[in-house]
Amino acid sequence: MNDAAQLIVSDAPREAAERVNLLGMSRAGLQEFLVGLGEKPYRALQLMKWIYHQGVSDFSAMTDVGRDLRERLSACAEIRPPEVAEEHISADGTRKWLIRVEGGSCVETVFIPEEGRGTLCVSSQVGCSLDCSFCSTGKQGFQRDLTSAEIIGQVWIAAAAFGLPKKGGQRRITNVVMMGMGEPLLNFDNVVTATDLMMDDFAYGISKRRVTLSTAGVVPALDKLAKVSEVSLAISLHAPNDALRDQLVPVNRRYPIRQLLDSARAYLGAQTDSKRVVTVEYTLISEVNDRPEHARELAVLLRDYPCKINLIPFNPFDASDYRRPSRNAVSRFWNILTEAGLRVTVRSTRGDDIDAACGQLVGRVEDRTRRSERHRAARAGSPVAGAA
Ligand code: SF4
C-alpha cells in the first residue's frame, strides 16, 4: 500500500438477509411496497427522507413513522448499504473507497475535492466487459452488474463519511459521475433507478446538470435512455476516426462514431433544457492519439457539434504499455482545438498515488470471462489454454 494512503479494514461481510432491502428502491417501487403493507403511498416519501437525507438505517429511529409500521418494517425489510473494505486518502485529498459487494468482489468509488465542488465517481458493474485498451478496469474482466442498492450505496457511504447536508453539514458531494468501473448503459435499469435517486429531492436532490452518465457508446441503450432519464451525458470518444477508435474502444466496431454522435445529439434533443451539451472525453495517449493530425481531425469531426471536450492525459498502470503524453503534446492538442473554436478543458490528474486517477480503477473482480488471465498471458508472451 502507498505511504500516502490510509487503510481502514472493516469486518467480514454480513450474510445476505432474507428481508427486502429498501436502499436503492425507486420512489414508485417503495410506494408500491408500502401499499402492499396496507399503507398510504406518501409514507414512501417519509421513509426516503430518513434513508437519504438523514442517513438512517434503523427503522426504530424514524420517529415520525408510527410504531406499528416501524415494527412491521423491521420484520420484513432493511436498509443495507454495501460495506467499506478499505479507504485510502491521497496526498491531494482525493479519497478512494474499496467497497465490498455481495459475493465478495469489490468495486471502487472515488471522491475528488476541488475548489467549490466535490465530485464522486461511482461504479456501475463489477469489472467491465468492453475491454477498452487504455483502461485498467477493462483488463480485470467482468463479473456482474451492481444492484441499484450497490450503486446508490456508494453515494450513501461517501455522504456518511462527509456528514449529511440535511444534518447541518455543508454539501460536499456536489457532482456525481457514473465513470467508475463498468459501462453504465449495460446495467441500464439499475443505473437509471440509482441516478433517479441521486436527482430526486426526497433522496440526494443533486441537480440533473451535475449527475453525469458516461458511456463508451452502447447506442441502442443510449437511444432508450433518452426516453427515461434526464442525466447529463458524457461519451468516451478517445479517437477522431473509426480505424483508431476500433482499436481503443472495441465497442466502436458495432456502433461507430457517426452513430454514437447522432444518438448523443438525439439524447440532447429529448431533454427539456435546450442549453445542455455532451461532454466528449478524450484520453490522450502518447504517440497513439495525441498527434497534431489527430487534433485537427477531431476539430473537423466536432465542428458545430453541441459539446465540450475534456482532455484526459493517460494515467499509466501496470498492465499497460501506453505512456502518458508530454506536457507539450497536451498543450499543442489543446491549442489546435481551441483555435478551431471548440470548448476544451484538460483534466488534472488526481489521486494517482492511491491508484484513483481516471482509468486506474481495478477493485477486486472475480473474473467470469477469463479476460484478466488472457491479458496476463499476452503480456508474458504465452497463450491461455482454451482461450477464445
Ligand atoms: S473505459 Fe469504461 S467502458 Fe471501457 S473498459 Fe473501462 S470501464 Fe469499461
Image (tube, helix red, strand yellow):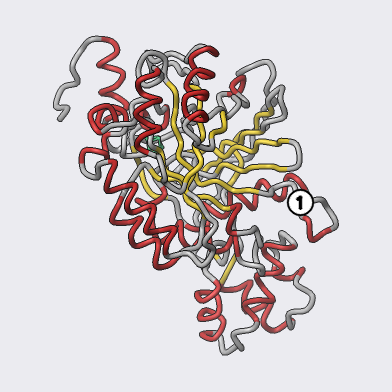
- Name which residue type carries label 1: Arg
Mark 1 lies on residue: 171
Is 232 situated above or below 320? below
Q: Where residue 349 appears, x then y in whole percent? A: 59, 24
- The residue at 85%/57% (across/down) is 168
Q: Where residue 305 appears, x then y in whole percent? A: 41, 46
Q: Is residue 125 visible?
A: no
Packing grade of label 1 (10 A; few <14, some 14-19, many >=20) is some
Is 86 situated above or below 233? above
Is 209 situated above or below 48? above
- The residue at 83%/52% (across/down) is 169
Q: Is residue 379 visible?
A: yes
Say whether residue 329 is left or right of residue 367: right
Say whether residue 200 is left or right of residue 146: right
Q: Quadrant of the N terminus?
A: top right
Q: Is mark 1 within 8 Å of ligand 1?
A: no
- The residue at 74%/83% (across/down) is 66
Which of the pair 323/75 is nearer the observer? 323
Say whether residue 384 is left or right of residue 94: left
- Which residue is farthest right? 168
